[in-house]
Image (cartoon, rainbow, N blue to C red):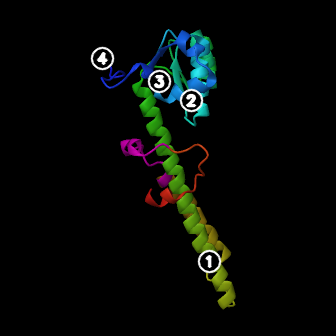
Amino acid sequence: QIGLWKPEDTERNRITGVAFAELSDEEALDRVMDLKIMSRARPTDKQRLVQLLQQKGAVVAVTGDGTNDAPALNHAQVGLSMGTGTSVAKEASDITLLDDSFNSIGTAVMWGRSLYKNIQRFIVFQLTINFVALLIVLLGSIVGTELPLTVTQMLWVNLIMDTFAALALASIPPSESVMNDKPRRSPDFIISKAMQHN
């Protein structure tokens, strides 16, 4: 009913916790990316699933509310526990959904991506301003006897730019359009080619 299972799916796409535990590491690694449903999963099965997915290069998020979810929540890159869940699950997780709503996960991702873009905008802005100022002063010192910008003028430019303009960039509200972007790889540097499109 919720769309997890489709007509084209086969037995390869689902497994029970017991059958999953019986698979060797090689067999499990071969099949893990195709698994959609694991029923009757035990805490160790969930943890193993998370670790196998990570070995495949996947970034894993786990949601759970019980003590039996704690190992998987702890090993995942992002653990999401429910506000009504056990204290063990909350301790093992990174984020607690106070309203127990899965929609909040999407909202959190949207805010995170928007904030990241705002930081990128701020960095591009600062690099541009400082590079231009450096170039002006450098060329001025080479060509003429006097600096094109005095120290006071440079400080004044920095004071205006680093406060008002930077605050304006950093406080741009979150946009739902960021959800159309492809996920960013965790090792990627914050300064990238894509920054010029932001």
Which numbered mark, 1 or 4, is in the foreground of this view? 4
Instruction: Residue 178: say if magenta.
Output: yes
How many angstroms separate mark 2 from mark 1 (CA)? 49 Å
Q: Give the structural element (helix, strand or loop) at label 4.
A: loop
Q: Which residues are magenta?
A: 169-183
How many angstroms separate mark 3 from mark 4 (CA)? 18 Å
Query: For mark 3, what is the residue?
Result: 35
Within-10-Å neighbours for mark 3: few <14, some 14–19, many 20+: some
What amino acid is labelled 2 in the image? Leu
Q: Give the structural element (helix, strand or loop) at label 2.
A: helix
**Could you say which quadrant of the image residue 161 lies in?**
bottom right
**Could you say which quadrant of the image residue 143 lies in?**
bottom right
Query: For mark 1, what is the residue?
Result: 135
Within-10-Å neighbours for mark 1: few <14, some 14–19, many 20+: few
At 50% across and 50% down in the image, what residue appears? 118
First in sequence: mark 1 vs mark 4:
4
Within-10-Å neighbours for mark 4: few <14, some 14–19, many 20+: few
First in sequence: mark 3 vs mark 1:
3
Please state which of residues 182 and 154 is positioned toward the viewer in this rendering: 182
At 46% across and 38% down in the image, what residue appears? 111
Which numbered mark, 2 or 1, is in the foreground of this view? 2
Query: For mark 4, what is the residue?
Result: 1
> Residue 20 at x, y = what percent?
55, 16
What amino acid is labelled 1 in the image? Leu
Badge 1 vs badge 4, beta-carbon distance below 8 Å: no
What amino acid is labelled 3 in the image? Leu
Which numbered mark, 3 or 1, is in the foreground of this view? 3
Q: Give the structural element (helix, strand or loop) at label 3.
A: loop
Q: Is residue 37 visible?
A: no
At 47% across and 48% down in the image, what residue appears? 171
In this picture, is 137 found above or below 127?
A: below
Query: For mark 2, what is the residue?
Result: 53
